[in-house]
Image (spheres, rainbow, N blue to C red):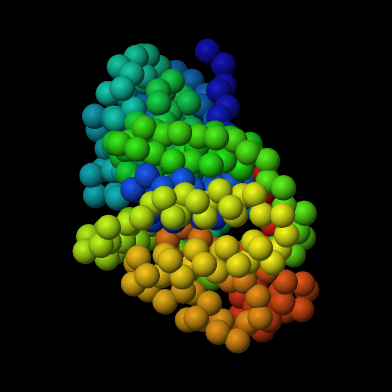
């Protein structure tokens, strides 16, 4: 058996954050940066796992088996849980008598929030020859849009109902992407925490998913930047009302003359902004130096 190589795209969610959990259609885009997983059989038993950062330095290393591992190591415990879950879906997975040398490598810093977990889940699912959506639901949970982005090399309209995903690849007609860029907010957002907040905030009100699905369609078909910004600002207002949090622009950049749109779980990771080089300088002056052009980020 030869070396096996697997790769999954990172992701960004442009619309319907949170409400995608309740069936709204969302616009998700795969990023050029993702994560690889390489598997080489070895004669010694057990799994020797190495996880590399973008600079090639290991951030996690361990040798273990699914039966014998250090239960005091949180990262290892979660990894074994994922592998055990994958094996429950395919009993032949990891059933050979030999061992494995496994190496994963991220193209992006872990704290960027582009999907270090979802790319790992999708890679393991490919290795185990199982459904990545089922593996996600059984391990991390979530809507699954990140798995869909991991598997597609173009923007998608994504929705899920009762855990059943619907994925529609699309072409964006946007001719203004040179005026869009992403800014990292210098902190990692815990998506589980964000989902829990959304669930608590949305229990008291009925979510009109149709409104967000309609906005997703309109945004994906926007013909000019002005229309795009108007729709995105309306989206921010609606999400703000649902989750009872002030939009990121109101909180951090109230005097910025342009779009600032939260992505994914509000409060961390990347935001989407509009403007020219002067606009980018505004964010640099505020201490935000990880700024990536739309076309440089999106696959």
Q: Residue at x 68, y 40 (%)?
A: 171
Q: Is residue 229 visible?
A: yes
Residue drawn at x 25%, y 33% as measured from the top left: 68
Q: Residue furthest bottom?
A: 255
Is 112 or 23 nearer to us in this picture? 23
Q: Is residue 299 above or below residue 17?
A: above
Up-down: is 269 above or below 221?
below
Percent x, y for residue 26? 49, 48
Q: How many marks?
A: 0
Viewer-side residue, 133 vs 55? 133
- Which quarter of the figure has residue 98? top left
Pick whichever, 278 or 105, lies toward us.
278
Residue 2 placement (x, y as % from top left): 56, 16
Task: Residue at 52%, 13% (x, y): give it.
Answer: 1
Figure check: 206 above or below 283: above
Q: Give the quadrant of the C terminus.
A: top right
**Residue 8 can be seen, yes or no:** no
Left or right position of 214 against 154 = left
Q: Position of residue 89 (x, y in %)?
A: 31, 22
Image-based side of 292 in relation to 192, left or right:
right
x, y (%) of residue 29?
58, 47
- Using the image as rendered, state which of residue 22 and residue 53 is in the foreground: 22
* Quarter of the image where one finds residue 275: bottom right
């Amino acid at each position: 058996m030869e070396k096996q190589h697997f790769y999954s795209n990172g992701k960004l969610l442009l619309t319907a954050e949170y409400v995608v959990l309740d069936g709204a259609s969302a616009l998700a885009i795969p990023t050029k940066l993702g994560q690889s997983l390489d598997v080489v059989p070895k004669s010694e038993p057990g799994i020797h796992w190495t996880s590399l950062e973008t600079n090639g330095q290991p951030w996690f290393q361990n040798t273990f088996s699914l039966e014998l591992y250090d239960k005091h190591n949180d990262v290892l415990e979660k990894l074994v849980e994922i592998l055990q879950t994958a094996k429950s879906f395919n009993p032949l997975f990891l059933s050979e008598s030999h061992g494995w040398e496994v190496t994963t490598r991220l193209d992006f810093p872990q704290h960027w929030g582009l999907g270090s977990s979802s790319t790992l889940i999708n890679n393991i699912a490919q290795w185990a020859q199982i459904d990545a959506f089922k593996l996600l639901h059984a391990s991390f949970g979530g809507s699954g849009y990140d798995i869909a982005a991991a598997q597609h090399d173009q923007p998608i309209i994504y929705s899920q109902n009762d855990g059943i995903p619907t994925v529609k690849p699309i072409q964006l007609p946007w001719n203004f992407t040179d005026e869009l860029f992403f800014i990292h907010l210098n902190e990692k957002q815990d998506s589980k925490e964000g989902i829990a907040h959304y669930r608590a905030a949305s229990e008291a009100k009925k979510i009109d998913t149709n409104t967000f699905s309609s906005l997703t369609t309109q945004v994906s078909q926007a013909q000019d930047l002005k229309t795009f910004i108007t729709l995105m600002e309306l989206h921010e207002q609606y999400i703000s009302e649902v989750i009872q949090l002030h939009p990121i622009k109101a909180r951090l950049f109230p005097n910025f003359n342009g779009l600032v749109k939260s992505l994914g779980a509000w409060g961390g990771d990347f935001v989407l902004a509009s403007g020219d080089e002067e606009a980018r300088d505004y964010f640099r002056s505020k201490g935000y130096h990880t700024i990536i052009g739309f076309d440089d980020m999106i696959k």
